[in-house]
Image (tube, rainbow, N blue to C red):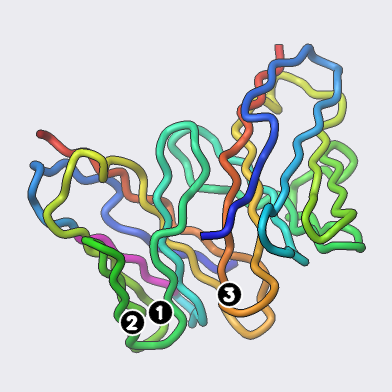
Amino acid sequence: GQQLNQSPQSMFIQEGEDVSMNCTSSSIFNTWLWYKQEPGEGPVLLIALYKAGELTSNGRLTAQFGITRKDSFLNISASIPSDVGIYFCAGRAGQGAQKLVFGQGTRLTINP
Amino acid sequence: GAVVSQHPSRVICKSGTSVKIECRSLDFQATTMFWYRQFPKKSLMLMATSNEGSKATYEQGVEKDKFLINHASLTLSTLTVTSAHPEDSSFYICSARLSQGLDIQYFGAGTRLSVL
């Protein structure tokens, strides 16, 4: 089945540093979604992307829909302690596709 | 963003009992809802897709008689774990797909099920 490869699996950074993570797919996606999950909670939607090449920001977060439609990245600028959590990419392929395919997640740890 | 309410957030039950988890879309109609299971430090694993007014579509390896899904209205889907056993202990998360406008999927806060 379809798979998303998300990297890195984990990141340990200093507060104030920028963060970059990405997802790649073997097949084309029409929608890319980025979520953040904190312990014991459900994923919270951060950014949604719908067009190849689309670049969207949400505060210090920026995400892009790759022009090949097989990848997406998420950047976090000037990280702060509350950015700690697990970030998941998710994609939906094809018109009418119902299921979201999830990446394995990137666990972000920030040293103050 | 839209709100998906999941209840209860935590449940502890005895082995052999059944547990019902509710998922409600509070401010939008969701023709499609999804149920996921998440193991510690793992990604979300889709269990089933629930369409309002029709039978749920289960993923391969998920027992439909064990995990009963009902999507009786555009704002409510329920997952019932029947005859729960300790191996069913997990974090269950529902999500709802916005029916109109942008293609977005919102998640509930999850339910931690512990079967003794």
Q: Does residue A38 sit above or below A98 in this rendering? A: above
Going by the numbered disc 3, the residue's amino acid type is Asp
Measured as percent of width and height from the top left, residue A104 is found at 42, 52
Q: Nearer the viewer, mark 2 or mark 3?
A: 3
Q: Quadrant of residue A101?
A: bottom right
- Check the image and name the residue furthest to the front: B27
Q: Which chain does tag 1 point to?
A: A
Q: Which chain does tag 3 point to?
A: B
Measured as percent of width and height from the top left, residue A32 is found at 45, 72
Label the magenta part by its dominant secondary structure: strand
Q: Find out whether residue A21 is within the magenta segment.
A: yes
| Residue located at (84% from left, 47% from top) | B69
* Marks 3/1 same chain: no
Per the image, the residue denoted by label 3 is B103
Near mark 2 (Cα within 10 A), the count class, few <14, some 14-19 or many ≥20, is many
- Find the distance from the CA under tag 3 to the CA under tag 1: 18 Å
Going by the numbered disc 2, the residue's amino acid type is Gly
Near mark 1 (Cα within 10 A), the count class, few <14, some 14-19 or many ≥20, is many
Q: Which mark is residue A70?
A: 1
Residue A18 is left or right of residue A9, and the answer is: left
Q: Secondary structure at mark 3?
A: loop
Dividing the image into 4 quarters, which one contains the N terminus of chain A?
A: bottom right
Residue A99 is left or right of residue A52, and the answer is: right
- Find the distance from the CA under tag 2 to the CA under tag 3: 18 Å
Which range of residues does the magenta coloring cover?
A: A20-25
Q: Secondary structure at mark 1?
A: loop
Contact (Cβ within 8 Å) of mark 2 with mark 1? yes
Measured as percent of width and height from the top left, residue A22 is found at 30, 65
| Residue located at (49% from left, 82% from top) | A28
| Residue located at (43% from left, 56% from top) | A35
| Residue located at (21% from left, 45% from top) | A11
Per the image, the residue denoted by label 2 is A66
